Image (tube, rainbow, N blue to C red):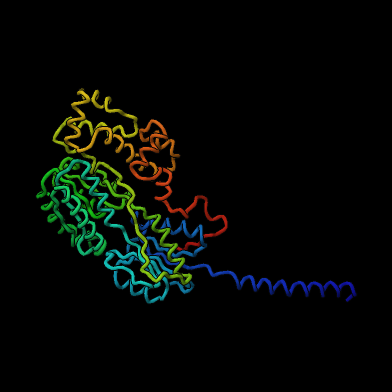
Amino acid sequence: MARGQERTAVLLMTRTKPDRQNQARTSARLPRIPEVALLLETSTEYGRGLLRGILRYSRLHGPWSLSVAPGHFDQVLPKARSWKGTGIIARIRAPETEKLIRATGLPFVASTLLESRSPIAGSPYGEIRTNSVAIARMGATHLLEAGLRHFAFCGFDNCNWSAVRESEFSELVKSKASSCSTHRVTSANWMQRHNWMESWEHERPILARWLKSLPKPVGIMACNDACGREVLQVCTSEGLRVPDEVSVLGVDNDEMMCEMSNPPLSSVALDVEKAGYEAARLLDGLMAGQTNGQGQVVQVEPTHVVTRRSSDVIVQDDSLVAGALRFIRDHAKHAISVEQIADELRVSRRTLERRFLRSVGRTLLREIIHCHLARAKQLLLETDLPCHKVAVESGFGSLKSFNRSFNQREGTTPQTFRLRSRNSNVHPAVSRNHDLKVSVV
């Protein structure tokens, strides 16, 4: 070998050896990509909302390798030999599933279908829970504002979250000097029984007798959309007019289920996507060995009521007041005045204001602002319209009057309200630097 070639070979050897050592050190420092099993149903809006939030967190703070099986509540842990799990997020249907998850020894964040107990302080796991007290209060307020005087609650037996909603709803409407009847579905509980469709034929006559026994008109809050849909089906078969005789409100705002109901079902919307994001954040900390020494709970909060035909009713003994309420609701997106309403109803302003205050307990102007703000909140939560367009679309004459009215009612600005309802750590345009691996099992 020539002397020049020998020098080149020596140089290559001395350069290559350190480079390989540096590569080995670099690869040793790379953290392992977390492998997370998602035992969440894709058949309900609740499960899909949690999945959307988890995916958003993974894209921002991952990457994570996610294992998910499309289906209902019967989820199982991945059985592939290649799956080396580091964490689990699940909705637990049966004690057997919980035992299997605990047996893995992995950190997990779970939602039990019954929500019957709180997590143990300092444990390497967390829990997802619905804020059933706030949900019940929002539902009760919605039905009370319709002017109804008789109320009822239909829930599931042996479900703690349903019982909490029933208790809170009953207590609130009774505090307004209103009656409240309750009923619990047993054999047709679709979450606890595999053969609930077969059992439903036995449950239907019992539910029908209860519905027909209620004083009319009545406002019924169902524990969730599935229960609300069952109530609507029985009302139809028994000839009970919805919403004139029976107004029905569900929970979860599962759009497909609500829109396919007859009539379409009103529902309390939940911020499950934000809860999914927070559950992923909690699991990330647990996988890193972080615990705060306390039971760790992710709350699923209600955001607003999505009003559809099933609860779109105004109950008033005074037909003049009922007409005013209907006009205000039908024109919530327009700037309207008391004079316009009086002209529409062909009555003097003074007479209308006096009778409205006596029947409803608040002024016409306050009711107009209330309906404008309700529409504004819906637009802030469900759209990305800028605040000045929200002001126009919700009947306010200017952004200044919108901000002033919103701040007086909600104690914050519209922009802050929107940001608070969403996860402050979530940003649009994600995962430029991280690849998301999802395996379907």
Q: Quadrant of the C terminus?
A: bottom left
Residue at 25% from the left image edge and 45% from the top image edge: 142
Q: Is residue 299 above or below residue 290?
A: above
Q: Is residue 19 above or below residue 402?
A: below
Can residue 441 be seen? no
Can residue 31 be seen? yes
Residue in the foreground of this view, choosing between 99 and 78: 99
Q: Quadrant of residue 47?
A: bottom left
33 on left or right of 233: right
Point out residue 150 in the picture as x, y percentages from the top left corner. Answer: 14, 46
Residue in the foreground of this view, choosing between 348 and 123: 348
Point out residue 275 in the picture as x, y percentages from the top left corner. Answer: 38, 58
Point out residue 44 in the picture as x, y percentages from the top left corner. Answer: 33, 56
Q: Is residue 19 above or below residue 160?
A: below
Q: Is residue 359 above or below residue 138?
A: above
Residue at 62% from the left image edge and 71% from the top image edge: 27
154 on left or right of 416: left
Point out residue 425 in the picture as x, y percentages from the top left corner. Answer: 47, 55
Residue at 20% from the left image edge and 38% from the top image edge: 361
Number of disc labels: 0
Q: Quadrant of the N terminus?
A: bottom right
241 on left or right of 29: left
